[in-house]
Amino acid sequence: MANKLWEKNFEVNKEIERFTVGHDRELDLYLAKYDVIGSMAHITMLESIGLLTKEELKKLLKELYHIYEQCEKGEFIIEPDVEDVHSQVEVMLTRKLGDIGKKIHSGRSRNDQVLLDLKLFTRHELIEVIDHIRILFNELIQKSNQYRNVLMPGYTHLQIAMPSSFGLWFGAYAESLVDDMYYLLAAWKITNRNPLGSAAGYGSSFPLNRQMTTDLLGFDSLDYNVVYAQMGRGKMERNVAFSLASVAGTLAKMAFDACLFNCQNFNFIKLPKECTTGSSIMPHKKNPDVFELIRAKCNKIQSLPQQVMLIMNNLPVGYFRDLQIIKEVFLPAFKELEDCLQMTAYIINKMEVNESILDDKKYDPIFSVEEVNDLASHGMPFRDAYKTVGLEIEAGTFKPNKDIHHTHEGSIGNLCNDKISALMSNTLSQFHFDYVANAIESLLNSCK
Ligand code: ARG
């Protein structure tokens, strides 16, 4: 049996086949489960418009569910002479059910099928990413509250500048995740629209019920215009990649801080020794490799939008095989980011902070502005106060008052972590994960 869906009366050149299939046999495994779910919705709709009988639908759904279970158990494979996941599922159905299996592709093309698979996969992975962010966010807020009174030097130009605190440092990264979450919400909205029914990119002469598959799959809406639906290939990936890059930027920056603060010359934080790695030659070493790897992996993820963009750049309207290559960079990125998020939360939880950093006299000048402000608030013009304190520091007579009072919003004494948490919860409440989960659950139940 020919295993190309499109094979007609001539044999495909083996070299051409090898090159065009590329890494699809491995990469499409990321999509397998979603390809099956998409087919469940598609054929349920086909039955409703008279293109399958009730009996055929029942048999197909049962078999698709069986394939779904294989995916869940990690037993689904794409056979060596099968091109991609879409072909594999159809081949399996046809082997089992004969001609009925060949009916499922009415009104569909692999172009909208892969669009749909990518959206369902991405939607699922976004849920995972967001869940990991929520955990990390809570960890950061908890640490920020716990260490709200522990001061540390703040830097500009990597020169000691002004008093800061661990409350501010941890809280800053929590708030950074709030902005990342706004980005993810936009990415989610773009992802959560149904491209199925656009077929090859120009719709179909069958009277497809696209709203029905939209509801069955728990999408918010359709990508209505079929030409636009196809244009979403690459665009969705690029926008999601931007949101992942935003999160990765937060993690990479924090990882660099942590490496720096963990260095003996800073000695602001410490990792328990079981969270460090050793050296093969220097017996004293306890290296923060975890943060170094988070930094590098997250820097790599920040290149993802550019990679996606360069692959699809300047393609005109309509499907092109170029789009297949996006999967190579896009699909593995989620697990990598999820791993980094999980590791960051884990290690932040274990991190110990040095509560007496500012006892060291070398940090005394960070209190200079406190002193200037104090003089100014007692009536001395700011510029004169600045000069007075400056001269004291030069002369070595400056005595810092370390009992500082910062009261405005977002400052050391008024972190506003409750406000930051409210922004996060408000954004999280806009995702409607339950609606999606219920739809998929009902669809799967309809197969049993
Ligand atoms: N592997 C292909 C991709 O990822 C599937 C779609 C094939 N469509 C086609 N017209 N050749 O793009």
Image (cartoon, rainbow, N blue to C red):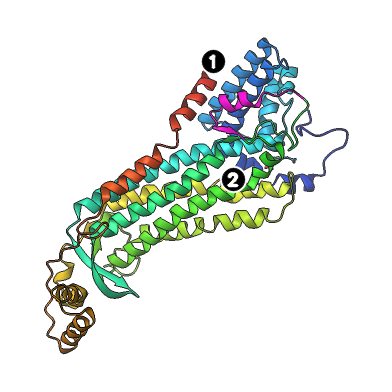
Point out the quarter of the image occupied by ligand 1.
top right
In depth, the one of 144 and 446 nearer the eye is 144
> Distance of mark 2 from mark 1, alpha carbons?
33 Å
Return the residue at label 2: 236
| Residue under the point 49% across and 46% down | 334
Residue 448, numbered label: 1
The residue at the point 63 percent across, 19 percent down is 44
Q: Position of residue 445 (x, y in %)?
A: 51, 18
Q: Quadrant of the C terminus?
A: top right
Q: Is residue 217 magenta?
A: yes
Q: Is residue 79 visible?
A: no
Where, quadrant-wise, is the N terminus in this rendering?
top right
Image coordinates for residue 248, horizontal then vertical, percent = 45, 55
Give the crowd class for mark 2: few <14, some 14-19, many >=20 residues within 10 Å. Answer: many
Residue in the image at 70% along x and 36% along y: 226
Q: Amino acid at mark 2?
A: Met
> Which is more foreground, mark 2 or mark 1?
2
Range of magenta residues: 206-222
Do the residues under discs 2 and 1 have CB atoms within 8 angstroms?
no
298 is within the stretch colored magenta: no
